[in-house]
Amino acid sequence: MEQDNAAGVLSQTLASSPCIKSILPARIRSPLLNDVVLVGHSSIHLREFMQTGALSNIIADLELGVQVLSAKVISAEEYVLPTEDAILENGRDEIRYKVRGQPCDDSQPPQIVVLSTALGELVYVYAKTLLNGNVQFVHARRHVLGGDYHWPRKYGKQLAVDPQSRALAVASAKTHFGIMALKDVDQIKEEIDNWDPRNPLTILPIKEQRFFKVDGVILRMDFLSSSGDDPDRVFLLLIIANQGVSRLLLYRWDTWRPLTTIKPLRCSGQPLPPEDAFPHLLIPSSKGTSFAIVAGQRIVFYDNVNSKSVKRHPVKIPKDNQRNDKLWVQYAKPFRHEEHKRRKEDIFLIREDGTLKTVVVTHGSSSNTSIAFDPGHLGMNVDTAVCALSAPPMVGGDILIACGDMTEGGVFHLAAREQPRLLQTLSNWSPIRDVVHIDGKATSSIGHDHGVVLAATGVHESRAALTELRYGTEAHVVFSIAYDEANSVDRLWVVESRTKRRMFLLASHHEHTTILCYEVDTAETIALDADLCPQLCFKEPTLAACWLPGDAMLQITTTQINVLGPSAEDQNQHFGRLYGDYACADVLASKGLFVVLRREDNSVSLVGGITTTKPEVKSEVALLPETLRADYVPVDVKLADVGGQTICLCGSLDGHLYLSSIDPERGFIPAKTWSLRDFTKDLHDVQIASIAILGLSRADSVLVICGLKNGRAMFFELAVPTYGFVDSAQLSLKREQTLGTTAVTIKAEAETFMENERNAYATCGSSLLRAQLHRTKSGLDYTISSLLITDKDNASYIPTKINAVDRMGRLNSTQYDDVGMLLVCVVADEISFLRVGQAAMMPRPIRAMHPTKHLMYSSLLRKCVASVHGRTASWLDINGVQQCDKPSLLVLDPNTAAEHETPLPKSQFFFGEKGEKVRVLLSWTPTDGTSHFDVIIIGSDHNNAGRLAYMSVTRMSQPKTGGSARLIATYPNASISAVCAYGLSSLVVCAGRVLKLLHLDMATKGFRHLSEIELPSRATELRTKGSVIYVATSLHSFMLFREENSRLKIVESDSWASKARNMTPHGNSSTLINLVSDHGSRLLNFSERPTRGTRPTFEARMPQAIDRLDPLNISSTDDKRGRFLATTIDGTVYLFTTLTEAEMRLLSFLEQLCEPIKYRMAKNMGILAQAMIKEKGSILESQGRVPPSLGNSHARGDVLKALLEPGAYNIHSLLQRRIKMEEEDAMVKLEDEVESLEDVARPVLDNTDDVVEGVVVWLRSLLNVPSF
């Protein structure tokens, strides 16, 4: 049960809006990688442009927590191969990069992305690949004006970079702009790496800067190319509007002189013709001091603007059959040869409806502009972002990447004289029209205890869908290998030979073993057999396999132990072999130690051995002197080093764990036994299917994972005293989780993968879970998340069953893409190689459907019900009558994917009149205590009248169409805005501004009107808890009502002039209110029923308006926190988690440690302005016109997450940077800061010696979002 002592809230962005604002080709990792940066509302994503002409999955993302206004690329000096060389290389110019005359290193980024935000700051970003194969953004922030200043806001409304990256210009929304002289790219990267978030002066990517104020509003701004006669001059062009007249301002800076010498040219101030006054696009030309603008239905080329007489060449864009009121909003320049660019310039113009035209500008004494071949239509709206790339040699032509606002994007191939061909669709789940959360109790029968979140997405007929909002760690398919015997695989081992640069994939089946050999350098896969490799065993199932030190391979099957020596390819190789009858086995590769459970004489014994492998020496297998008799039925055995000792853990079929230590001279020493039934009272069936141990070197505790046969996994902490007695080991249960209904198989990574982390994978049916252990000096630091397999070619892909899993080692390929650290999964009839990414929201379209605003889940049908109206709902009913323009209810099975098609008659139910619009859907089960029936309440509008009706769920479960809805009531001139259930058999309805109470007579199935009361404004949402009715209104925040003697009586109300979108009761008596405005959302929580004099317990302000706010019930977590899932129209998804007062104090300290600028912002904005704001707020609060303000009760998880990641925000880096200060008392300040952290952390943490490490463990656990 959720507690009501919440004093703060933690917000986390699970998914940024998929709407893309700009697309930037930027090599921000290496000159060899074709990276593409997609910029969203408040985040950026990184994809790689592949040789197939498509984009990879998102490989990195960065949530900035503030609106991004503009984005540009800063580049090292570019140069291309000569045209003759380009012809020899498939006729293409190859771009190279150099810094200060030296070629750019392949391991360094030649380009950096710069972003401007709404807080008046510039963010410099590049990316790097980590040791585990993941890609991470590295960034640094600096305010435009330097220091801690936050004024003026939105200074970066426009951003421009000189074509040679010598200067950067930034402009405000109105009259201010600045120009900055940039450092070289390698120097900027070094500044980013050395950035300290606590000291803004540690990032200085510029040499000097200067700011200006102009008389007018800045419409457009960009740099122009330097002329061939003056290559060292920088030209900045601005189009200024004042009193209806637009003028050109041109500034010139000679780069060999200080920036203070920049000045406007004499030609500045020239007015534009009225038809060019307010251009939609400003397009700099590759010709010096020239540009083009697009205004209305014409493109105008301006030549030699630095002269007194500007040459103007207008060209009218030809008309087509489409509407001419659409605007030309985007442009892109395709890649062309240097020889071609000297003579001509190609420009792609894109209209907002997707129409594409090519403009060719011929450079000469007078530029001529012409409209070339019309490539056609892209088939999508393009109003936000577009970029052009050179197609790979095998494809040819051009690649165009286009995105729109709340519409899907695409990657298009443009071949000469051909229509655009769609190569790849970039998914976009916005807008989110409605969300329904299916509780974990309803999905427990199919093996889920975390529930399912479904959403109605899309607004157009071609892309509306029922979408599952999944959150977890992405594992996208890189490539697959066909494998006919995949369905019979039980276990998988990926054994790597680094000296031979090959990998062996050993798949154990029920009665045999198959082995595939993967050559790293050639990417070839060979199926081995006894003829090709007679030293390995293929006739029996494999129990364990690994590569040992000394370049030897160990294979343990049910009948023999094979050790392949270093000369494995030699026919006369030396190897060791030991025969027996083995049940299960494990290997500790670092020590060459193995253990097997051997059957003999109707008994089972635990047998250990040590392998010895040296070059040119025969491999040997030596058994330990003593064995241990097992008086139980073993199912799995594991070895591990913990507390300076080697332990062995056996799992039995009846749910017992047997711990023993291993001494090389004495053999096995029994230590302790535990029964799983002692740790859980909810489970009667605790039969163990598999176990795994996760531990790091020099640790005194490990994570033990038990997979049970009933589909559950249990996670334990096993603590062993360092160099102490193993029989004093302690086992404690940390977590339980349901994966499915069949046996759970656990597979741990090899111990040599990563120094600071280890992973284990649990498979059950189609579920794949990852347990990740992190290195820490205090406690057991681990996270558990679901791995969600995705395929960029199939957005709805989900494997039917995962048979086995293992992970590759850290490899590097010189000829093909790096396959190191890939996850290998055996699924269906193939082996898939997956790249594990980051935790993210991964919406999965379940099935196409008609656009809808209303979605609900029927527990009786176990299906979703959506309302459909308009012409899209037309269908012939069971009598053959055309039901055009009538509303209908569409029944959708969330477990069955289907292509977009007209719904089958048995799943669509028509009702009402033509033109009727559904406003509310509600699943309702009224009862009188003895009988009940299930109905769906429908609130709709028709001819300015509200109609309330219901449809029987029993009739909807029958395989026929044409079911009619029974009318309850009609309300003339009153639209129904909200409906909710009340009591056992009553309904609360808001029609217009009137709240009505209706009661259902179960005997007659007739409704009786009991009471009504007028509201000050219409209700946006109705909720009930106990006997209280919670009403969120559109203009007057909230009101509370209760029924007394069949009458509605007001309990409490407010007079806040605010719009309440949601009002969610939770816990015993708490209420969460969502107030929306043009500036976003404000969440207020009350521990008791809200009244005028009650102060909220916490407050959270979000930059976007939240449209839906619902409790998120996740039974896999055993804490008492309240969790709420919030969505916005544009597809942003937030998670809110309640905090106690002590937790809020700790997180406030950490957030201040991470971003102290936020807490000094009030001083820098001016004491007078703050005083005026505070005084005005106090007056409004005293008058009850706005809710009371709170102090610091909102923690931003997006900021706190950086404390756990490598980089400038890492908590250890932030604390240790104080040591590097030149002040004499640096160490004293560090100690004081740690003591301050200890003061706020002790009330939250358990007993721990290292406070910083304890905070890291606690914070990681808090920020770990439960998968759903």
Image (cartoon, helix red, strand yellow):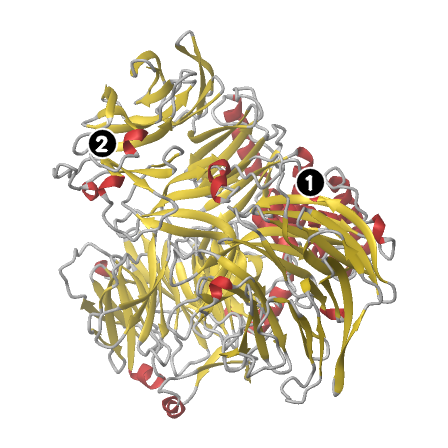
From the top left corner, tell me how far across and down residue 625 is, in percent: 85, 67
Q: Which mark is residue 963?
A: 2
**Front one among 117 and 1009:** 1009
Residue displayed at 71% across by 85% down: 574
From the top left corner, tell me how far across and down residue 757 is, in percent: 67, 60
Which amino acid, mark 1? Arg
Which of disc 1 and disc 2 is earlier in sequence? 1
Image quadrant of residue 367?
A: bottom left
From the top left corner, tell me how far across and down residue 1158 is, in percent: 60, 46
Q: Is residue 970 left or right of residue 681?
A: left
Whole-number angstrom distance, CA of label 2 to CA of label 1:
52 Å
Image vertical order of residue 895 relative to residue 427, above or below: above
Q: Which residue is mark 1?
A: 677
**Front one among 524 and 1230:** 524
Which amino acid, mark 2? Gly
Image vertical order of residue 260 relative to residue 742, above or below: below
Residue farthest toward the front in the current orientation of the protein: 601
Residue displayed at 46% across by 43% down: 452
Residue displayed at 52% across by 19% down: 1092
User: Secondary structure beneath disc 1?
Assistant: helix
Residue displayed at 43% across by 18% down: 983
Image vertical order of residue 768 relative to residue 235, above or below: above
